[in-house]
Amino acid sequence: MIFMNLDNNHKNATEKELYKIKHLLRVKLIPELDELDNKLKTNTVEDIIEDHPEMDKIIRKRKEISKELELWQKKIDLMNMQNN
């Protein structure tokens, strides 16, 4: 959606989509990964997975997920700079 808006020169729509993604990262995803990291300081991976089996893939790939989030933040910042 963002790239389509950029291609069609819809600056306001692009800014709105970028804001929504950045907000999701900042308010939801990053705090949840931070919380997970804090839990991992006091619990073992196995204990957390035993209590929350749905978290298995997220726990095992959390570093990759964190890197991907950082990459998206950088992309969004770059797009915002280019859009202004």
Image (tube, rainbow, N blue to C red):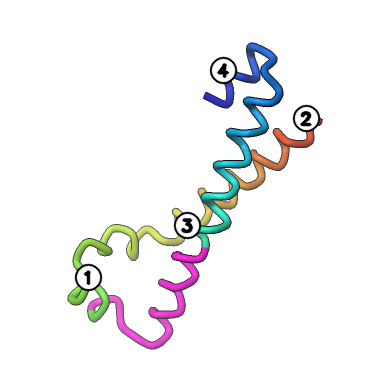
Q: Mark 2 points at which residue?
A: 82
Disc 3/disc 2 C-alpha distance (Å): 25 Å
Amino acid on which disc 4 is placed: Met
Magenta part of the protein: which range?
31-46
82 up-or-down from 26: above or below: above
Q: Residue furthest toward the right?
A: 84
- Looking at the image, residue 42 sits to the left or right of residue 66; the answer is left
Query: What element does badge 3 sit on?
Result: helix
In the foreground, 32 or 10: 10
Residue found 45% across the figure and 73% down from its top: 35
**In terms of sequence position, does the residue under pointer 3 or pointer 2 come before the other?**
3
Residue 78 x, y percent position in the rendering: 72, 37
Give residue 4's mark: 4
Q: Earlier in the sequence, mark 3 or mark 1?
A: 3
Instruction: Give the residue type that dot 3 points to.
Output: Leu
Q: In what element is the residue under mark 1?
A: loop
| Of the image marks 4 and 1, the number of the one nearer the N terminus | 4
Q: Along the horizontal axis of the image, is 56 left or right of 37?
A: left
